[in-house]
Image (cartoon, helix red, strand yellow):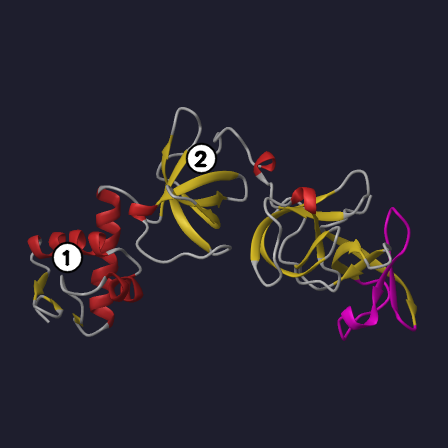
Amino acid sequence: MVAIGDYNELEIVKQVDFGVYLDSDDGEILLPTKYLPADYRVGDILNVFIYRDSEDRIIATTLKPKAKVGEFAALEVKQTNKYGAFLDWGLEKDLFVPFNNQRDAMQPGRKYVVYVYLDENSDRLVGTAKYEKYLKKEADELTEGQEVDLLVAGFTDLGIKVIINNQYLGILYNNEVFRQLTTGEKTRGYIKKIREDQKIDVSLQKTGFAEVTDASDVVLRKLRNNGGRINLSDNSTPDDIYAALGMSKKTFKKAIGTLYRAQKITLHEDYILLKNK
């Protein structure tokens, strides 16, 4: 059975003036000419995304949507009507988010994090901003200290909500975030703590000794790549430090302190030198 809202490998079985037909267990599916690779032949196997077009027909495309069924993405609202909102997800037909799937009324031009699913009643692809029920409640595949993928999902007084590995909800506390994040931004992070209630605290950096060791290696590598000097010091701004090294000022100060005590660097008012350089 063809998987609507996902990628399928299907064989070209027929050529017509407006495209080709692909064979599937649900019958032949049209792939329009504009999506065909230049060197296609009947008999080729193509990896295509399957969805429904504006006339509700199952159709194939070689375009890649920003999310498929079972995934989260931050999508911009193109327009709204009395039924809901239509979000740009990279295909000709926009992703529909009905009113009952919205937290607040979606506004054109704004981005929202949504989950994409196949509605069982209509057999149509839809999105929902009320995505919590699609997240796992038990953090059974995570361990503290593990490096993970994060999707910025929203902001609260306490911190920043993030979706972890497309499966779990976590939080980055405001006092531990050292750079600006935006809704829908993807970044790497680390599991800081898994609480007894299965709530997950996340950090943008490793914690403890491992964090300082990694940061020290980053500083040393930067020094070596820059002829033994970098124009950073205790007086540098957090933004300058992050732009150059990808770490917080607090971590940077710990790292250069470790390197100084190990007699690997010398510290100056506006720069650092690699010793013996």
Residue position marked by numbered label 2 in the rendering = 142
Asked whether 41 falls inside the magenta stretch, the response is yes
Viewer-nearest residue: 137 or 277: 137
Residue 197, given in percent of the width and then of the height, sits at 43, 25
The span picked out in magenta is 17-44
Depicted 132 relative to depicted 54: above or below: above
- Dividing the image into 4 quarters, which one contains the C terminus? bottom left
Lower sequence index among marks 1 and 2: 2
Q: Indicate the quadrant containing the N terminus: top left, top right, bottom left or bottom right.
A: top right
Secondary structure beneath label 2: loop
Rate crowding at label 2 as few (under 14), some (14 to 19) or many (20 or more) other CA atoms within 10 Å.
some
- Which mark identifies residue 256? 1
- Residue in view at x 50 percent, y 44 percent: 163
Label 1 crowd (10 A; few <14 / some 14-19 / many >=20): many
| Residue drawn at the location 41% of the way across and 41% of the way down | 171
Q: Indicate the position of residue 59 as horizontal and vertical percent values.
A: 83, 58
Q: Identify whether 47 is placed above or below 153.
A: below
What amino acid is at disc 2?
A: Leu
Report the residue at 29% width, 62% height from top. Answer: 242
Residue 196 placement (x, y as % from top left): 40, 24
Look at the numbered discs 1 and 2 and tell me whether their residues touch, using CB distance below 8 Å: no
192 over 126 or under it: above or below? above
Displayed quadrant of residue 36: bottom right
What amino acid type is highlighted by mark number 1? Ile
- With 99 as the anchor, is 17 left or right in this view? right
